[in-house]
Image (cartoon, grey):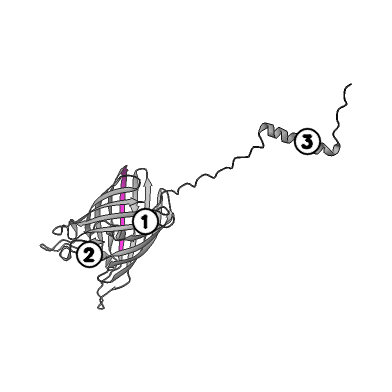
Amino acid sequence: MQRPPRLVSPSLRPWSALAAGLACAVGTGLTAPAAIAESPPDKPPPPGLTLGQGKLNVAVNLELELSQDRVGKPFSISPDVSYGVTPDLTVALVHSRFATTGFRAAAGGGLCLAGDDGGCVAVYNNVGLEGWYSVARGPTSVAVGGGVHALNLDAGFYNLKLGARLRHVAGKLGFHALPSVIVAVTERDDGAGNRLNKDTLWVPVQVTYNLAPLTVGLGTGVKGALSGFGDAYQIPLGFMALYAVDKATTVGASWVFGQVISGATNPPDPSPPVEGFALRGVQLWGSRTF
């Protein structure tokens, strides 16, 4: 005898439907724990003109005077140390003429080793503390900043620096500028109106070409004391080569004529020239980021 179908109580029908749904879900694996989607790692910021957070850069510069009748007078070893406080803020303890002014023509920063007769006022006579903040990154990068400098510890010359760093990259070409103004805070004159510690303008510009791992560059610009700038300005001309040993290490060299053109006029012989190709300097440097 055929048994009559079992009837589900109306009050139990919702629970039966739920049980059937769960069984189907188990059979198809739909109740397996969903994988937790991991957030993709943060992309590094585009290249800029400041160090990455926590990065330390150490640069050591050899500065050598090669002007006519003054070869090696002076010569110096000048270390610069920079630290990335944040991805956008870098602070630096600097000694080199390049870090101070943006130009590589002069010698005598940091440890001046040529002695009194070689153009050194003292073995250690300058130091600066700077900070730079990135305001634009990518093909066109900009950082602004400045710092405090003791340009001449022996004479008590203390100064404030305000400036900017600019770089534009187009393919293998790079365009660079490091304009700054250095303002005298102490020993501005001798009491008789004669200027001692002078306010100065520095506007180095450079064009580079990347032949990775080698980069070559041609630089010029304008520099000089703001007071009587028409007579005090100087225009240099220099050449640079930079070699990337690896991603963290570079070595470089420059040959710069410091005053090819100026607001002054060369005196008659045998006085030393104040402009022209007889005024020159060489620098060698190495830099590593940790």
Q: Which residue is mark 3?
A: 17
Q: Of circles 1 and 3, which is in front?
A: 3
Q: CA distance from mark 3 to mark 2?
A: 92 Å
Q: Of circles 2 and 1, which is in front?
A: 2
Residue in view at x 85 percent, y 30 percent: 6
Label 1, secondary structure: give it.
strand
Q: CA distance from mark 2 to mark 1?
A: 30 Å
**Upstream in sequence: badge 1 or badge 3:** 3
Q: Which amino acid, by three-letter code, is at mark 1?
A: Arg
Label 3, secondary structure: give it.
helix
**Upstream in sequence: badge 3 or badge 2:** 3
Provide residue 219's location: percent of width, then percent of height. 28, 52
Q: CA distance from mark 1 to mark 3?
A: 71 Å
Label 2, secondary structure: give it.
loop
> Callout 1 environment at 10 Å: few (<14), some (14 to 19), or many (20+)?
many
Provide residue 256's location: percent of width, then percent of height. 23, 54
In the figure, residue 53 lies in which quadrant?
Answer: bottom left
> Callout 2 environment at 10 Å: few (<14), some (14 to 19), or many (20+)?
some
Which secondary structure type mostly characterizes the magenta part of the structure? strand
Q: Nearer the viewer, residue 68 or 38?
A: 38
Provide residue 94's location: percent of width, then percent of height. 32, 60
Q: Of circles 3 and 2, which is in front?
A: 3
In the rendering, which numbered label is found on residue 33? Answer: none
Q: Which amino acid, by three-letter code, is at mark 2?
A: Val
**Upstream in sequence: badge 2 or badge 1:** 2
Determine whether, in the image, residue 59 is placed left or right of residue 266.
Answer: right
> Which quadrant of the rendered structure holds the N terminus?
top right
Q: Which residue is mark 1?
A: 165
Determine whether, in the image, residue 23 is placed left or right of residue 47.
Answer: right
For the record, the magenta segment spans 201-212
Q: Which residue is mark 2?
A: 123
Q: Nearer the viewer, residue 85 or 242?
A: 85
